[in-house]
Image (cartoon, helix red, strand yellow):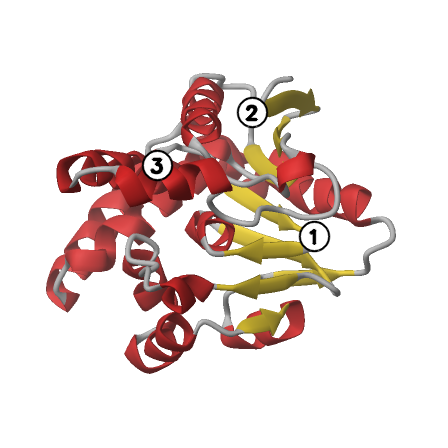
């Protein structure tokens, strides 16, 4: 059975974590399959968004038993290499040109919650559950902290990663970790309708905006303004902008 399923709906690439019997737990094969599929999607100029979802009852429950056993017996160097593989996935999600959307139902816990948090946008059913419970087994949700701290700031991030409690999709929405909630019934069609918004928007503008937003992380205020001015000028030169201005002026 394939660890990851890929299909295309219009201009949306849908990647389905396909380990339902393991609650779509992450392992090396699934992480590598995600990296390959996201890279492949990035090279397709016809695509406007990528959606990551889970098969079965849950989005993703984190690492599976075999992965935990591997962690327990591995050396520091082996564990570091393994951790870097997940870090590369998070980095890739940010670096690809088009938006990557997590569509969460059921539970998104530990590495699964990290995967959702690492996406550009998080959609969730009203009954979805989230959490970073790693601290309960002496582990640390360390890689996702780079993103979580940027999303929430220090105080909320500290609470989430050091207490490890589960929280609802509604609470995630109020925190700012979940962009939009949908009823459980009809979630798939609602998620695709949301993602299809990017089919109606300039691809080049979304690409430039995504890249700039994340590049600003380490910039000073003046540096961010300067980068913004450069991207503003670059956007004006694109075909999409030229056509958009012409259409506006000829109304």
Q: Does the rendering let one see residue 18? A: yes
Residue 132 image offset from top left, x and y in percent: 45, 63
Label 3 and label 2: CA atoms lie apart by 37 Å
Residue at 49 percent across and 33 percent down: it is 203
User: How many neighbours does mark 1 have within 10 angstroms: few (below 14), some (14-19), or many (20 or more)?
Assistant: many
| Residue 62 horizontal/vertical position (percent) | 49, 48
Q: Quadrant of the C terminus?
A: top right
Of the pair 198 and 65, the residue shown nearer to us:
65
Q: Report which residue position mark 2 lands on.
A: 47
Lower position in the chain sequence, tag 1 or tag 2: 2
Of marks 3 and 1, the one in the foreground: 3
Q: Is residue 107 above or below residue 32?
A: below
Q: Which element is circle 2 on? A: loop
Residue that carries the numbered disc 3 in the rendered image: 70
Q: Which residue is mark 1?
A: 105
Residue located 38% across and 32% down the image: 96
Badge 3 local density, few (<14 within 10 Å), some, or many (20+)?
A: some
Query: Pointers 3 and 1 in contact (CB under 8 A)?
Result: no
């Amino acid at each position: 059975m394939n660890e990851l399923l890929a299909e295309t709906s219009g201009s949306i690439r849908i990647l389905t974590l396909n380990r339902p019997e393991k609650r779509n737990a992450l392992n090396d094969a699934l992480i590598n399959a995600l990296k390959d599929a996201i890279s492949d999607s990035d090279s397709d100029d016809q695509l406007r968004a990528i959606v990551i979802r889970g098969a079965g009852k849950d989005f993703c429950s984190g690492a599976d038993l075999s992965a935990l056993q591997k962690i327990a017996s591995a050396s520091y160097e082996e564990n570091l290499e393994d951790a870097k593989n997940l870090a590369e996935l998070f980095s890739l999600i940010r670096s690809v040109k088009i938006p990557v959307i997590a569509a969460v139902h059921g539970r998104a816990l530990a590495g699964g919650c990290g995967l959702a948090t690492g996406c550009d946008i998080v959609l969730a059913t009203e009954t979805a559950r989230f959490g970073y419970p790693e601290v309960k087994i002496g582990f640390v949700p360390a890689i996702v902290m780079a993103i979580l701290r940027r999303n929430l700031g220090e105080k909320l991030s500290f609470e989430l990663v050091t207490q490890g409690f589960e929280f609802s999709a509604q609470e995630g929405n109020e925190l700012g970790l979940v962009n939009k909630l949908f009823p459980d019934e009809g979630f798939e069609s609602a998620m695709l309708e949301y993602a299809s918004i990017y089919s109606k928007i300039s691809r080049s503008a979304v690409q430039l905006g995504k890249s700039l937003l994340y590049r600003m992380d380490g910039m000073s205020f003046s540096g961010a303004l300067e980068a913004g001015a450069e991207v503003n000028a670059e956007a004006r030169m694109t075909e999409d902008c030229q056509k958009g201005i012409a259409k506006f002026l000829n109304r």
